Amino acid sequence: MSLKDKIDPDRLPAHIAIIMDGNGRWARQRGKPRVFGHRHGVTSVRETAEAAAELGINYLTLYAFSTENWKRPRAEVTALMKLLVQTIHKETKTLHDNNIRLLAVGNLDNLPDITHRELMEAIKETAHHDRMAMILALSYSSRWEITRAMNQIASDVKAGIVDPAQINQELISSYMTTKDIPDPELLIRTSGEYRISNFLLWQIAYSELYFTPKYWPEFRKEDLYEAIIDFQKRERRFGKTSEQIVK
């Protein structure tokens, strides 16, 4: 029996989020520059997206570039932005072929003009697809997102749009950039690091966490299957007892 056959199709996570980590270290091990790893990571994105769509996953969020990544050497950032443009242009056909809708969250206004244009065009071109939504987190961090949400809520309170007494978890969620996307049920991080790295902190309150030692350029469909199988073995209680879940 293959790993894919071991997956229970009735217990799939509706939303999987992935911290794609390890491109640079994978490249260094091969005596190559970091961007070499980023380029090879594109294959992992393609395979993972195709596998998720084939299984019936509704949402796949990929942490592609954080607000902190802007601090990296200029040459690497420039190469990453160029690679992003090339990848979006090239992989739009893959999105069409697999009926995948592209979305993006983050401080997108910070992206270079050409990157922003290419991204918006791909989002527009794939807007009618409904098999799966693939969300790119670009120039994103949770602290940025939460701070932005608090500023917007404060502004709406001042304008009389929001009553402070009405502020609750649901209202705060409605101010997040992911307001139209369900919270992830499974969060995967590659490369053997055990950190969340400022990613979807509000949204992953009850997500199952899965860590793999594989670097992102090595991640393939079978690795996604393993993560889902592990997820399906877990008991998700949401604060309740096991007995309550059984009932």
Image (cartoon, rainbow, N blue to C red):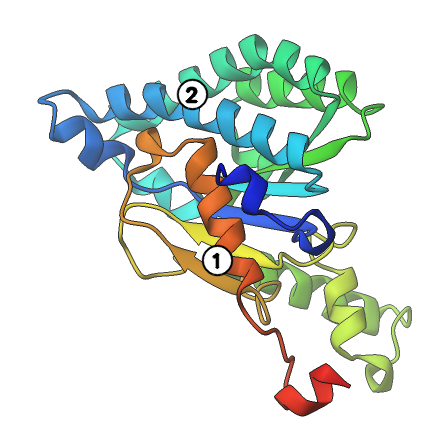
Q: Name the amino acid type tagged 1.
A: Asp
Tell whether 153 sits left or right of 226: right
5 horizontally vs 216: left or right: right
Q: Nearer the viewer, residue 180 or 229?
A: 229
Judge depth for marks 1 and 2 and give the one in front.
1
* Residue 33 % position (x, y): 17, 22
Q: Is residue 22 depicted above or below 186 in this figure?
A: above
C-alpha gap between disc 1 and disc 2: 23 Å
Residue 185 numbered tag: none
Badge 2 element: helix
Total tally of numbered discs in the picture = 2
Residue at coordinates 36% horizontally, 41% vertically from top-left? 69
Q: Residue at x 62, y 59 (%)?
A: 185
* Residue sitting at x 61%, y 41%: 60
Amino acid at pointer 2:
Thr
Q: Is residue 151 above or below residue 61?
A: below
In the image, is 122 to the left or to the right of 165? Answer: left
Q: Position of residue 235 (x, y in %)?
A: 58, 74
Left or right: residue 39 compared with residue 224: left
Where disc 1 sits, the SS reads: helix
Q: Residues within 10 Å of mark 1 (few under 14, many from 20)?
A: some
Q: Position of residue 9 (x, y in %)?
A: 70, 47
- Observer-nearest of 27 and 240: 240
How would you rate the neighbour count of disc 2 (Cα within 10 Å): few for under 14, some for 14-19, many for 20 or more?
some
Quadrant of the rendering where the C terminus is positioned? bottom right
The residue sitting at 19% across, 36% down in the picture is: 25
The residue to which callout 1 is attached is 230
Q: Which tag, 1 or 2, sits closer to the chain's start? A: 2
Residue ID for mark 2: 43
Position in image of residue 242 (x %, y %): 63, 87
